[in-house]
Image (cartoon, rainbow, N blue to C red):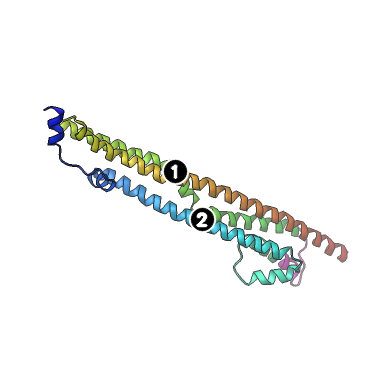
Amino acid sequence: MNPADAMQAAPAIDMSLFGLFWQAHFVVKIVMVGLLGASIWCWSIIVDKTLLFRRTDAEMDAFEEAFWSGRSLEELYRSYNDRPAKGLAAVFVAAMREWKRSFEGSGRQVQSLSQRIEKQLDVTIQREVEKLESRLLFLASIGSAGPYIGLFGTVWGIMTAFTSIAASKNTSLAVVAPGIAEALFATAIGLFAAIPAVLAYNKLQASVAKSQSRLEGFADEFSAILSRQIDERLSLAA
């Protein structure tokens, strides 16, 4: 059979994206559906984290403005202790809570108060950072594994295509091209899922590092303020 006769004999094949998916081997279909689901989940994480970091930055700005406005620490503590605290407010409330537990009550546990406050600050910062970093590992996983999963679908699809070619004993382009296109479509979906995940992970991880640095900087400043007050109270008590 000459190439012209083979092309005329070949059935019409839908080369649209939906057609490529529908005609693919069921293993390749599973890979495509999994990658598309992972891509949708990645984008939901990206949108959610982007909004979260915007809210976090706004809350930190509002708290810093209130903290440096000249209000007393007791007044600021009462205003933030009655509601869920996040970011800088959570660090402030944790330190003040330890402060008040040490100075209120029958005994005044001033010894090693600075160390206890620093531990509270470290633990609170770690918890806040963990909240910001939650689900980012999924982006990193899809970014690194997505292309390989797509490549697996491509290899499987090409194997199936060549098996079909060998069975039909027809090597015309009209017969070979659809199977190869279906296989390569899996790699394209893998890259479609992986590229945004990698870019978003790098961007969001940089935002986490920025927020962590801001939390640690405030913790150092606030720890110094409380340390000076502790020294003043000890000198008065002496």
Residue 63 in the image: x percent, y percent?
67, 63
In terms of depth relative to the viewer, which is nearer, 133 or 35?
35
Assess whether residue 106 is covered by the magenta stretch.
yes
Quarter of the picture containing the N terminus is: top left
Residue 100 visible in the shown view: yes
Residue 57 in the image: x percent, y percent?
61, 58
Q: Residues within 10 Å of mark 2 (few under 14, many from 20)?
A: many
In terms of depth relative to the viewer, which is nearer, 117 or 10?
10
Residue 236 in the image: x percent, y percent?
87, 65
Quarter of the picture containing the C terminus is: bottom right
* Rendered view: 166 above or below 128: above
* Rendered view: 71 above or below 54: below
Query: Tag 1, which secondary structure?
Result: helix
Total numbered labels placed on residues in the image: 2
Asked which quadrant contains residue 59, the reply is: bottom right
Residue at horizontal 14%, vertical 32%?
Answer: 6
Magenta-colored span = 98-111
Please name the residue that numbered disc 2 is placed on: 49
Residue at horizontal 49%, vertical 57%?
Answer: 48
Please name the residue that numbered disc 1 is placed on: 195
Q: Amino acid at mark 2?
A: Lys
Residue at horizontal 56%, vertical 56%?
Answer: 53
- Left or right of residue 208: residue 161: left
Residue 10's label in the rendered image is none
**Are the residues flagged by discs 1 and 2 in contact, CB closer than 8 Å?**
no
Q: Amino acid at mark 1?
A: Ile
Asked which quadrant contains residue 77, the reply is: bottom right
Q: CA distance from mark 1 to mark 2?
A: 17 Å
